[in-house]
Image (cartoon, helix red, strand yellow):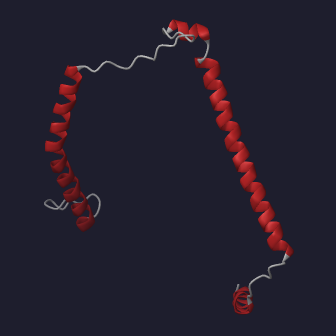
Amino acid sequence: MGPIAGLADQVRKERKPAAKDNPFLAMQENVSRQIVAGLDAWRDMTESLAERTFLAIYGLPSLQSAVGVDPAGTRPLRKAAKNPLHQELLQKRIAELRRVLPWVAFARLSSADSLCRHGPGRHRRTGI
């Protein structure tokens, strides 16, 4: 490996930027554009396939009529009802989280502090 390291140093010292008209730079740009075009085509194809599959399954008139959707209907689709009990439960849960989360954060921080100071598997008080 010694001779290779010496050659690598020599190459680093004599390295120069490639000329603007270098055919390898043009080839590199061409290959790069082709890769990007290929990836774009792949993305477009998979998204199109997913959309067509979705519409083929969920656009079936028999499925739509089974779930109560009239494909020829002009009425806007129903929205979920706003249940006052759900709103009350949601507000209670938010209040509970606001009360508990600071303590959870404190516990996690102190646990992380203990882990940093004593390493994994070592408890501050017992040394176990």
In this rendering, the answer to whether 93 lies above or below 102 is above
The residue sitting at 21% across, 62% down in the picture is 114
Q: From the viewer's perspective, is residue 73 above or below residue 45?
A: above
Q: Quadrant of residue 14?
A: bottom right
Which residue is found at the position 69% from the left and 90% from the top? 9
Tell me which corner region of the image, top left, top right, bottom left or bottom right, holds residue 65.
top right
For the point 86% across and 73% down, the residue is 23
Q: Looking at the rendering, which quadrant does residue 113 occupy? A: bottom left
Q: Is residue 84 left or right of residue 24?
A: left
Measured as percent of width and height from the top left, residue 90 is found at 22, 30
Q: Position of residue 104 (x, y in %)?
A: 19, 48
Q: Quadrant of the C terminus?
A: bottom left
The residue under the point 71% across, 43% down is 42
Query: Is residue 109 left or right of 54 when viewed as pictured?
Result: left
Q: Relative to 90, say whether 44 is above or below.
A: below
Report the front residue among 37 and 77. Answer: 77
| Frontmost residue, 108 versus 30 | 30
